[in-house]
Structures are given as structure tokens and as C-alpha cells.
Amino acid sequence: MEHHRYILWEKEIPYRLPEIEFVPSITEYRIHGCENAVLVCPGGGYKFKAEHEGPVIAEMINRAGISAFVLDYRVYPCKHQAPMNDALRAIRLIRSMGYQKVAILGFSAGGNVACCAATKYMDALLFSDDPVDKFDSRPDGLISCYSVVSMLERTHE
């Protein structure tokens, strides 16, 4: 099965560190005719993305008859605003492709990204020149797998 990769931003990337050339993207695992999708956010302690929590999970979601996208989000030295904004942009981009409902699923640090996206989403940016920004970033569902949910108390170190 062929998978297509989409870059999240064609122009200016918000919260970009000048010394980092990494460009956030999503890889599509499409089920033709499916109107719904799940955005998968692999964990990795905000230092990397765990391979066993990305493509393998997308393929499992495909076997259930649902399209999936794996988010390749920014990690260290980028701060939490960067990966969260990558997830929000990914949801908008997936909606712009015609998907009716978009859920977000994340593991560990990716679960934290998913939880942040589900609670700190933004409505459509009506005054933006970017057509992708016309779509809401609020996910229709959240699947949080052994996620980091607090950076204040009882965090794992």
C-alpha cells in the first residue's frame, strides 16, 4: 500500500527555531471511501517518535476500516507549543481533504500532544489567507494511551 506524506505548512511554520530545519508532516494511510480519520501521535519523551506507535498503529486502524494519518511532529529542542500546533494544523489539513470526523490518538508524550490538542484547540481562523486555516482544529474524539497529563505533579521522570 502506498502512503502519501503531506507537509503541514508550505510557508511560515509557527514556533520554528531558526537552527532546526525539520518540517512537520503527516503520512496518510487512506481507506478509499472512508469519511473519517484518526490522527496518530507516537510517543518518545518529546525527544523522538517511537516507530512501534506510528505506522503499525495506523495499519491497525486501517484494518478497522478507518483512514489514519501519522503525525511527524517537532520534538526537543522545540517547546510544547510547537508539537501542539503541529497536531492542530494536522487536524485542519485532514479536514481540508474532505474528512468529516477526525479523532486524535496519542501514546505517552504523543498522548500529551493529543490531550493538549483536544483541550486547547482553535476555531477556524477566518481572517487567515491560508485556506487550511478555515477549518476547525477541534478533534471529534480523543484516544489517550498512557499519556503524560500533568507536568506539575507526579510526572514520570
Image: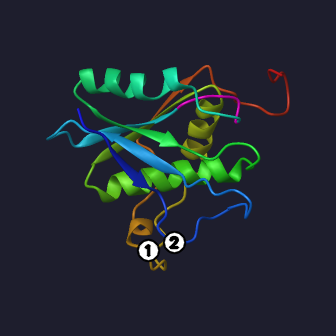
Say whether disc 1 or disc 2 marks the residue closer to the N-terminus. Answer: 2
Asked if 37 appears above or below 19 in the picture, the reply is: above
Distance between the Cα atoms at labels 1 and 2?
A: 10 Å
- Image quadrant where one finds the N terminus: top left
Amino acid beneath label 1: Asp
Q: Name the residue under label 2.
A: 11
Judge whether residue 138 can be spotted in this image: no
- Label 1 Cα crowd, 10 Å radius (few <14 / some 14-19 / many 20+): few
- Image quadrant where one finds the C terminus: top right
Q: Name the residue under label 1.
A: 130
Query: Quarter of the image holding residue 102?
Result: top left
Task: Tell me the magenta residue range.
Answer: 42-46
Residue at x 14%, y 41% (from the top left corner):
33
Amino acid beneath label 2: Lys
Residue 3, position in %: x, y? Answer: 30, 40
Residue at x 80%, y 20% (from the top left corner):
156
Residue 46, position in %: x, y? Answer: 70, 36
Q: Is the magenta stretch mostly helix, strand or loop?
A: loop
Q: Do tag 1 and tag 2 residues touch (Cβ < 8 Å)?
A: yes
